[in-house]
Amino acid sequence: MAPPSAVHLESAGCLTALGDARATHAALLRGEIALRPHPVLGADGGEHVPLALATGRGFDETAPPNWIDGVRALAVTIPGDGWGTARRPVWVTSSNFGVGSLYAFRRHGDPAHLAYGTPHRSVEWLAHELGWGANVTTVSHACVSAHLGLLLATRALEAGLAERALVFSFDFISPFVAGGFHALKILNAGFPAPYAARATGSIGLGDGAAFAVLTRDAGDFTITAQSLHNEMHHFTANRADGAGFATCLAPVAAAVSGRRVWLKGHGTGTLEAARLECAALAEAFPGAPLTGWKGSLGHTLGSCGLVELALACEAIRAGRAPGTLGSDGPGFRDHVAFAPLDLRGTDGVVCTSNAFGGAHAAFFLGHA
Amino acid sequence: MLERQLHALSLADAGAEDLAATRERLKDRFPRGATRRMTQLGLLLGAALDDLAPQPGDTIVYASSFAETGALEGYLDSFPTASPTLFQTSIHPSAVQQALIARQHAVGEFFPLTGRAHLAAQALQTALLAPAPRVILCGGEERGTWLLAHRAASDRTFAFALALSRDPAGSLARVTLAPAADDTANAEFTLPDFFDALRARQPIDQLAAPGRRLGVAWI
């Protein structure tokens, strides 16, 4: 399958535990770690695990959800209007939506939480709060969700079904999702050290929301070579030979051949996936430095692809990309960058994400 | 206007059947031992997908408003000792993943969608924009228990899969999605509406999403 042609990125922004895209980028360059130890089940207690919550937001669910203020603040920075109308469609991507509200309802019985618990109720409420029309498509493929939204928006633009497209992603962590990753034992008392060769793997989880406005011809950046692959080998493990990573990266590598790229990887802090990811990226993009930011921000789940896209734009504008946070190394491979990257002379960045089921997603972000 | 030909269709309406009965009925459709942890929606979708014999180059589009309700209810009930199995099974695209992982069947593009009022049209648009020669559009729901009592789950259990291509030879129906002048938000056409129309082989010609008119003309 031929990758789609270029789509322009008119604007991108994000919200993390460190603030908006500019503030987050600056804090990551300073090496700040947003993750803090919190009881995994919030008020219900449990082991302390690394979580990165948006400023002022409590971990325990409220009704209405307490993440809406941060989302509103982000949404006012989206350029243009008329979102959700026929020619200005919206793709909402998430893995959590408002599912923390269902946890709160089941634990405490307050029916007020039910208004936000299912994906469509949370998105309908979000659309109402942000003043969008009804042309909102919702994508849910765990931690590659945002990449799918970008590709679907690209295709709608290419087909002439949209004049501009908005991809919006939000994932705010709750005891529901923290409890799940804790049960899988990859969210534990340890702090994540993505790509670092160490004995025990661990992840952190973080709040994240982000947007991207895509057009056919306006904006400083282009997104090309969007690639997807689903191994369907195991729910929580990749094929041991790394073939899933390689299959997804091959068309991207072909598309950027001869260009000087840097790599923004997935890098959650688990060990085997990181080993495979490092090897596949080194093979596909020889000599390209690899960085990842979940060691500070935590894993923002279905929103990570869009959060990290906004941060990559900031990095390119500033000429410096934060290095991999959470460790000083050594990494699984020599190309892991633990110090900030000087981006002078580079042509763009390959951004990748991965998800349950052996799902892989990648694209190239370059100058228009 | 976007257009494809519908070439194969598999429908499953489980009615009042429970998970154990569905598992017993469909156990021979899956590799030995694979059904033990599969959900009812995973079993039904897996059988429907199997009827269409997915190929590695197919794009798969999956639509469900509520998805893995049984696993979600079980996971929520497992606290404070959260179940890792039910957590991973409760994620939205799990039904398709259960089926394809059981067969070790890799796919390139897989688009799991959710929503409600416009979900059928949005899934069809996703399918009709995919460049793959063949696209499998599948979907379904499973009936909830305590979440249903709070209107946070489906009241029906069903699944479907259909194959779309550009080849008119042997087509069962012509599927179109056309721009429509009417941009109102009242164009509700849910996944159960779509399933019922497919089951009855009922022609469809209606506003199904803002600015989108859905057509299914049976041949």
Image (tube, grey):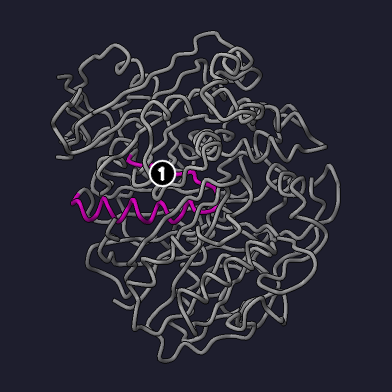
Given residues A127 and B110, the one toward you in this image is B110
Name the residue located 42 percent from the left edge and 45 percent from the top edge.
B110
Q: Quadrant of residue A270?
A: bottom right
Does the segment drawn in magenta span residue A146?
A: yes
Name the residue located 43 percent from the left edge and 63 percent from the top edge.
A77
Secondary structure character of the magenta stretch overall: helix
Given residues B196 and A317, the one toward you in this image is B196
Query: Where residue A224 sits in the image (x, y, percent)?
Result: 32, 67
Q: Which residue is mark 1?
A: B111
Secondary structure category for the residue under label 1: strand
On screen, residue A109 versus residue A333, left or right, reads right
Q: Quadrant of residue B26?
A: top right
> Residue extending furthest top?
B16
| On-image quarter of the C terminus of chain A | bottom left
| On-image quarter of the N terminus of chain A | bottom left
Q: How many marks?
A: 1
Query: Where residue A351 sits in the image (x, y, percent)?
Result: 47, 68
Please say if A150 is above or below B176.
below
Q: Chain of mark 1?
A: B
Query: Where residue A204 sits in the image (x, y, percent)?
Result: 71, 60
Given residues B194 and A99, the one toward you in this image is B194
Does the segment drawn in magenta span residue B165?
A: no
Residue flagged by tag 1: what amino acid is it?
A: Phe
On screen, residue A295 versus residue B161, left or right, reads right
Badge 1: residue crowd in 10 Å (few <14, some 14–19, many ≥20): many
Query: Where residue B71 sits in the image (x, y, percent)?
Result: 64, 29
Name the residue located 54 percent from the left edge and 48 percent from the top edge.
A142
Given residues A176 and A269, the one toward you in this image is A269
Q: What range of the chain is rendered magenta?
A: A135-160
Please say if B23 is above or below A155.
above
